[in-house]
C-alpha cells in the first residue's frame, strides 16, 4: 500500500517568508509526527498528533512553528518568518498506536533551504 | 528522561568485514528499541526492532539483541556489503512518554569495495 508522502520534496525560500509543508500519512494511521533533521544533526522531534487529542507541541523550537492536522489525516507544518537556521530536512511519520511498539513509518522528507 | 547514545561515526570498513555499532539507552519504563537506516538520498526506514528483554531483531543480515541488564541494543552484521553504506539510527519508544521516538545521533557507515 501507499506509504507516507510529503510535499514538496524540496523548498527554497527567502529569509522572512512563510512556508507550508504537507504530510499525507498512511491510511488508517491515527498517530502523526513531525521531526527535523538538520545537517550533521540527529533527528529532533517537533510535534505529535494522536486522534482527536490535543497535539504534543513540546518539540516546536519557537512560536514561528505551528502544525495542523485536518480530519485526522493530512497535516501541514507551517514556519512563519523563516530564518536560515530553519534550513533542514523535515520528516513526517505515522503509526498505528500499539501499546509497547509504536513503529513509525517515515516519509521521504521535505528539504527546506532558507537563503 | 529517556535518551539514546550511539557510537559516533563515521565508520569505514572493507567489504565482508564484521560490523558492530554500539547503542545504549536510558529509559524509565520498558521501551521498545529500533534501528532505523537512511540510505543516501532516501528516507528513514525501519531496519529491525525488539519489544522486550532478550528479544533479537533481525533483517537483511543485521541483528540486535535487547539487553536489559546492560541497557544496550548493539547492531551487528557478520559480513557487510557496499550497499550497506548508510546512516544508522538507534532509537527507543517508551509507552510512558509514548508520543515520540527518541533517536540517537546516527552513525554514518561507509563500506569500501
Image: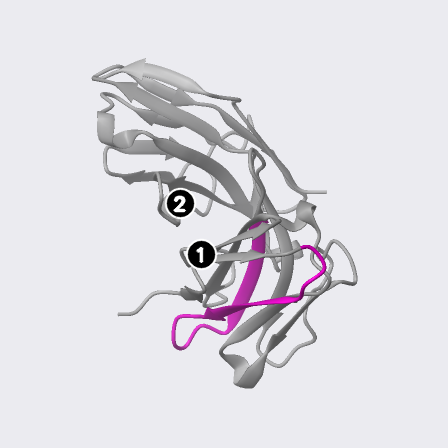
**Badge 2: residue crowd in 10 Å (few <14, some 14–19, many ≥20):** many
- Residue at position x 64%, y 38% in the image: B3
| Circle 2 chain | B
**Circle 2 sits on which residue?**
B49
Q: Is residue B51 something one can see in this rendering?
A: yes
Task: Point out the stretch of residues depicted in magenta.
Answer: A15-36
Quadrant of res B70 = top right
In the picture, the disc for residue A103 is 1
Q: Helix or strand or loop: what does disc 1 sit on?
A: loop
The quadrant the N terminus of chain A occupies is: bottom left
Q: Residue sitting at 52 percent across and 42 percent down?
A: B91
The picture places residue B58, in percent across and down from the top left corner, at 30, 38
Numbered tag placed on residue A42 in the rendering: none
Which residue is more in the foreground, A21 or A98?
A: A21
Chain ID of residue with mark 1: A
Q: Nearer the viewer, residue B9 or A40?
A: A40
Residue A101 percent coordinates (x, y):
47, 56
Q: Indicate whether residue B6 is drawn in magenta.
A: no
Vertical order, B109 against A90 (above or below): above
Q: Residue at x 34, y 23 (%)?
A: B110
Residue contact at pointers 2 and 1, CB within 8 angstroms? yes
Amino acid at each position: 500500500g501507499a506509504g507516507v508522502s510529503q510535499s514538496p520534496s524540496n523548498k527554497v525560500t527567502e529569509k522572512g517568508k512563510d512556508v507550508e509543508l504537507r504530510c499525507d500519512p498512511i491510511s488508517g494511521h491515527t498517530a502523526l509526527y513531525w521531526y527535523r533533521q538538520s545537517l550533521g544533526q540527529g533527528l529532533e522531534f517537533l510535534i505529535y498528533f494522536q486522534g482527536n487529542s490535543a497535539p504534543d507541541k513540546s518539540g516546536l523550537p519557537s512560536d514561528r512553528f505551528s502544525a495542523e492536522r485536518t480530519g485526522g489525516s493530512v497535516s501541514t507544518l507551517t514556519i512563519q518568518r523563516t530564518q536560515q537556521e530553519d534550513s533542514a530536512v523535515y520528516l513526517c511519520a505515522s503509526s498505528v498506536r500499539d501499546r509497547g511498539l509504536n513503529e513509525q513509518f517515515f516519509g521521504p522528507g521535505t528539504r527546506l533551504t532558507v537563503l | 528522561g529517556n535518551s539514546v547514545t550511539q557510537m559516533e561515526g563515521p565508520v569505514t570498513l572493507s567489504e565482508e568485514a564484521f560490523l558492530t555499532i554500539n547503542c545504549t539507552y536510558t529509559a524509565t519504563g520498558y521501551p521498545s528499541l529500533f534501528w532505523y537506516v537512511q540510505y543516501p538520498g532516501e528516507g528513514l526506514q525501519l531496519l529491525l526492532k525488539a519489544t522486550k528483554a532478550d528479544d533479537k531483531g533481525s533483517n537483511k543480515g543485521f541483528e540486535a539483541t535487547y539487553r536489559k541488564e546492560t541497557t544496550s541494543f548493539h547492531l551487528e552484521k557478520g559480513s557487510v556489503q557496499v550497499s550497506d553504506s548508510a546512516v544508522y539510527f538507534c532509537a527507543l519508544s517508551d509507552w510512558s512518554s509514548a508520543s515520540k521516538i527518541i533517536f540517537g545521533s546516527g552513525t554514518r557507515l561507509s563500506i569500501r569495495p
